């Protein structure tokens, strides 16, 4: 019989009743629920079944019953199917979130299958009590080596709290290179820093601070995240900008310029020295014929040495110039980006979630 049922389901041989019923039931986790289906006495060959449909899974079937009176209860650890007065019942005890789905009551009469009733069963878990997450921006400019404190205020309605335990608070950082946020800190005791307003129905406010000495690599967006009731809530984020020390930049440029100048002077001196030695070798060509071969060898050696020195120093010089240009360009882009973000931050009010 079950083989025929599956074949009929796959071949879509079923049809809906003339007045199909579809309703929705919402129950809490751990509650008991009973789904009912009308059972009319029309034929002795009719059978009734309950099936459950969950997106992405195969249909799940429950034990069926006959059209006629059949006082047998089919039970599993948490479900039971049985007959009632002109009804066919599916009972689910101590519901779990995984019980959420669409339940259909089906009547099968020989090769005819009819959908009598559909029920969307929603298992409602505990609701989180978080009402807002507010992050504060540092008021003063931040420079490398400064100590920065980021603050996150979590507002919650303690009267509607249904989850056991305290909130878990984490800090995430997303770098300027658009990388995925990474956890950088977790608060150990989330109950610290919480205060409840004496006013009636006022939310509870918990303040979480995160401090660190920053460097230029710590620039990015910092997010305060609160985990509760199996969910995680993020704040809007705090963008931490590290100001560039222009005095250090000027000193670095000056040192780089002096190195380039010293390299140029060294190149000129070496070229002059090697050239002078080469000329001395040329003057030695007027010596006796027996000394011609050694003089020629010394001349070739001096020329090779000159070429290597010139190539090495030109390569170093080119590298220093390219590094100086690249560094200056990046710093200019960073400075312009900081100015742009500061203008946007002044024109856009901050809002917490």
Image (spheres, rainbow, N blue to C red):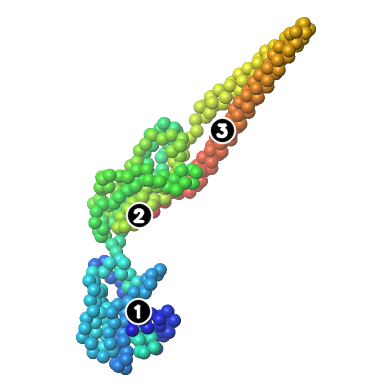
Residue indicated by mark 3: 327
Give the mark count.
3
3D distance between C-alphas at marks 3 and 1: 68 Å
Q: Quadrant of residue 90?
A: bottom left
3D distance between C-alphas at marks 2 and 3: 40 Å
Residue indicated by mark 1: 104
Residue indicated by mark 2: 232
- Of the numbered discs in the image, which one, if any, rests on residue 278? none
**104, 28: nearer the viewer:** 104
Question: Could you tell me which residue is drawn at 68 percent across and 17 percent down?
Answer: 301
Name the mark nearer the viewer: 2 or 1: 1
Q: Quadrant of residue 259?
A: top right
- Does residue 117 appear in this view? no
Badge 2 or badge 1: first in the primary sequence: 1
Question: Could you tell me which residue is drawn at 58 percent across and 31 percent down?
Answer: 323
Badge 3 or badge 1: first in the primary sequence: 1
Question: Could you tell me which residue is drawn at 39 percent across and 50 percent down?
Answer: 235
- Is residue 309 positioned above or below 141 on the image? above
- Does residue 291 appear in this view? yes
Label 1 packing within 10 angstroms: few (<14), some (14-19), many (20+): many
Q: Position of residue 112 (x, y in %)?
A: 39, 88
Label 2 packing within 10 angstroms: few (<14), some (14-19), many (20+): some
**236, 111: nearer the viewer:** 111
Q: Quadrant of the N terminus?
A: bottom left
3D distance between C-alphas at marks 2 and 1: 34 Å
Name the mark nearer the viewer: 3 or 1: 1
Q: Position of residue 293 (x, y in %)?
A: 73, 12
């Amino acid at each position: 019989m079950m083989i025929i049922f599956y074949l009929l389901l796959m071949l879509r041989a079923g049809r809906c009743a003339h007045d199909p019923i579809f309703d929705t039931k919402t129950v809490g986790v751990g509650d008991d629920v009973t789904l009912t289906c009308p059972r009319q006495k029309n034929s002795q060959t009719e059978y009734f079944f309950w099936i459950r449909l969950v997106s992405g899974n195969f249909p799940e079937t429950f034990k069926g019953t006959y059209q006629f009176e059949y006082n047998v209860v089919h039970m599993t650890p948490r479900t039971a199917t049985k007959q009632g007065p002109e009804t066919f019942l599916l009972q689910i005890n101590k519901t779990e979130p995984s019980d959420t789905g669409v339940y259909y009551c089906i009547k099968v009469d020989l090769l005819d299958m009819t959908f009598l009733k559909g029920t969307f069963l929603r298992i409602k878990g505990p609701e989180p009590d978080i009402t807002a997450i507010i992050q504060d921006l540092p008021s003063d400019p931040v420079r490398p080596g400064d100590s920065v404190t980021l603050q996150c205020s979590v507002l919650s309605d303690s009267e509607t709290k249904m989850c056991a335990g305290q909130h878990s608070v984490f800090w995430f950082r997303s770098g300027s290179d658009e990388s995925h946020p990474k956890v950088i800190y977790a608060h150990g005791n989330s109950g610290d820093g919480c205060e409840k307003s004496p006013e009636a129905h006022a939310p509870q406010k918990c303040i979480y601070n995160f401090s660190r000495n920053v460097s230029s690599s710590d620039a990015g967006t910092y997010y305060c995240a609160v985990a509760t009731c199996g969910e995680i809530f993020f704040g809007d984020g705090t963008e931490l900008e590290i100001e560039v020390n222009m005095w250090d930049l000027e000193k670095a440029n000056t040192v780089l310029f002096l190195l380039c100048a010293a390299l140029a002077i060294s190149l000129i001196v070496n070229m002059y020295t090697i050239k002078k030695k080469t000329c001395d070798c040329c003057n030695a060509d007027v010596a006796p014929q027996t000394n011609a071969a050694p003089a020629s060898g010394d001349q070739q050696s001096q020329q090779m040495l000159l070429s290597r020195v010139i190539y090495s120093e030109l390569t170093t010089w080119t590298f220093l110039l390219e590094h100086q240009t690249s560094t200056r360009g990046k710093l200019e882009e960073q400075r312009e980006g900081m100015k742009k973000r500061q203008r946007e931050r002044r024109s856009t009010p901050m809002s917490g979630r």
